[in-house]
Image: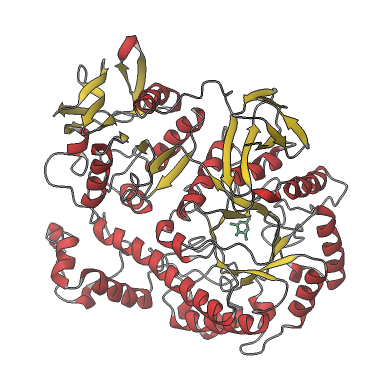
Amino acid sequence: MSHAAPRGLRRLAFGGDYNPEQWPEEVWREDVALMREAGVTMVSVGIFSWARLEPREGSLDFGWLDRLLDLLHAGGIRVDLGTPTVVPPAWFYRAHPEALPVSREGVTYEFGSRGAICHSSPAYQEAAARITRALAERYGDHPALAMWHVHNEYGVPVLECYCATSAAHFRRWLAERHGTLEALNDAWGTTFWGQAYGDWEEIQPPRATPTVANPAQRLDFARFASDSALANFRRERDLLRELSPGVPVTTNFMVSPTQCDSVDYWAWGGEVDLVTNDHYLVAEEDRNHVNLAMAADLSRSVGGGRPWLLLEHSTSAVNWQPRGIAKAPGEMARNSLAHVARGSDGAMFFQWRASRFGAEKFHSAMLPHAGTDSRIWREVVELGADLGRLADVRGTRTVADVAVAWDWQSWWAQKLEWRPSQDLDTRERAEAYYAALFDRHLTVDFAHPDAAGSAGHPLVVVPALYLATAAAGAALSRYVADGGTLLVSYFSGIVDEHDAVHPGPHPGALREVLGLRVEEFQPLRAGQEVRIDGPDGARLRGDVWAETLLLDGAEPVWRYADGPAAGGPAVTRHAYGRGAAWYVSTRLDRADLDPVLAAAAADAGLASRDDLPHDVEVVRRTGETGTFVFVINHTGAEAKVPLASPGTELLTGTRADARLAVPAGAVRVVRLDD
Ligand code: GAL
């Protein structure tokens, strides 16, 4: 995987989506002057500009964009230029109403918003290629051009389309995946409920059905939808690479499981020249900086550990959550620098100037409706200066301690209907284990289950992996046999890639490495809790789920004290080869996970970080320009943090000794002396 940085950018990226078409041209001059004042280095332009660039089919108007790019260039601002293919104009839909997407229930989504796209539509693909080609031919070597920004957030607001064109495309995709109809019938288990297909033409997308649809069919359709959008991304990317060589091509991801669930980013990460991500805090969530850290680690991980770029976040409130909670003073800087700590080579926003009209006029911006005499503007200017001081961080890599297995496809499968409990929740488990790791100050690399054990992490955590292929199971077994430590949570390793239960008792794909069998699932009633007793009298509480386990080599470490599996093992450890595999068969909350995680981490030889204060993030980036320790204090009190060696604190320009004091709510970045 290559790593490409925005062309001509020598500093960290700082700026935002810039939508000048919403403003008269005299405002543009003021914009550029203010961008310079704030230390903006790059803006994203043209993402929603198709109707302005091509007001009527075939009639192109580039004059305004010529003037804008020249103005930005004269101001020293680099440009991340969008292909506007997320918003085909009204004339396009009038000519091609069949390109509108259709929901599972048969509702056609109309024009008048954005993202109304059927990714299988040939008319859409042709029109998208034409406008992309025209842009690349005109601006491919423009001196302001730093990067191409294809489309916008594939996957949201809709990805799947169930129209007749998509159905035909789905059948072609299935023929390629399964080869023969027999193989498809087999993979989909169509002997169940008499669903066998005798001809490809009989197969439809899994549209709304009277009761639960075939889960393997639904899973394949989810894969198909992600692949179809990826094919459209590739078409645009390849045109841009051909016509604008040397300029990196990206599309902004939304890797956070709270924000997009329809794209398999493991398949996409290697297709972009630079991973870029958009992240929005769930403002009302308690300790929302933890999920921010998770999204940042996931962004880095889908790019194979390369530096990536935060292309959008918010200076303060967003307009699409139930309450537009404003960020507190200093929160925007903490958010921005937390992304940088975890590998982003900059911090960009949606958007530069707050809109006066349209659906997003109550979204915060770098330049708010209040203008420059505002806290937000002052903090934006300060952040620009801070990022300027961190230029040497560019290109360095974040150092992680632990791998966490994560798989979008397994999540899709687990979320389908008629699982043993409606309270099973892949995302919730991933977030809880992540939070427990965060609270132990362990930095996480996410990994596809097939590769989770291959990067040398001493501990691999599997929070929820309902779907695990035999290959993933074998890879995790090898990892443990070779000396690794594995920590697996319940309802993992149950089905294969076709949502078929692995042969034999659960958890088929992980049974051997865990050294146990599940005799019976014991889902708990709403609100029911079970007590589990552990070493030294430690007592924890589980809910949602329990299991009756039979041990084949694993040792019980915690036992159920009550509930349906009373007296039986709840948390186990299996010495396997040169390593050990831990299993947790109930839902522990973040705090109760801690002692279990501590035991597994100690098993893995990870040093405890008990000397670091709670809710103070300490993350390292290292590379040719040095080693940088980011310390982000999310608490309301000064924090003291030990450093491995003295260094220079880059934001204040002062010396830092072995014990760094970080004021309440502040961030410090120390470049270590050695
Ligand atoms: C993003 C999107 C932006 C803007 C933003 C508002 O998902 O890419 O265009 O809508 O959300 O938070």
| Residue 486 visible (yes or no) | yes
Picture coordinates of residue 222, whole percent (x, y): 35, 61
Classify the position of the C terminus by image quarter: top right
| Residue 487 visible (yes or no) | no
- Residue drawn at 21 percent across, 76 percent down: 200
How many numbered discs sit on the rendered protein? 0
Quadrant for residue 274, please give it. bottom right
- Residue drawn at 66 percent across, 36 percent down: 673
Residue most toward the top?
537
Instruction: From the viewer's perspective, tell me whether residue 495 is left or right of residue 673.
Output: left
Residue most toward the front?
674
Instruction: From the viewer's perspective, tell me whether residue 125 is left or right of residue 407.
Output: right
In this rendering, the answer to whether 638 lies above or below 627 is above
- Residue drawn at 64 percent across, 52 percent down: 394
In this rendering, the answer to whether 359 lies above or below 171 is above
Quadrant for residue 113, please give it. bottom right
Quadrant for residue 115, please give it. bottom right
- Residue drawn at 66 percent across, 60 percent down: 359
Picture coordinates of residue 626, whole percent (x, y): 62, 44
Picture coordinates of residue 5, whole percent (x, y): 60, 62
Can you tell me which quadrant of the image ligand 1 is in? bottom right
Residue most toward the bottom?
58
Instruction: From the viewer's perspective, tell me whether residue 529 is left or right of residue 185.
Output: right
Picture coordinates of residue 481, whole percent (x, y): 23, 38
Instruction: From the viewer's perspective, tell me whether residue 221 is left or right of residue 396.
Output: left
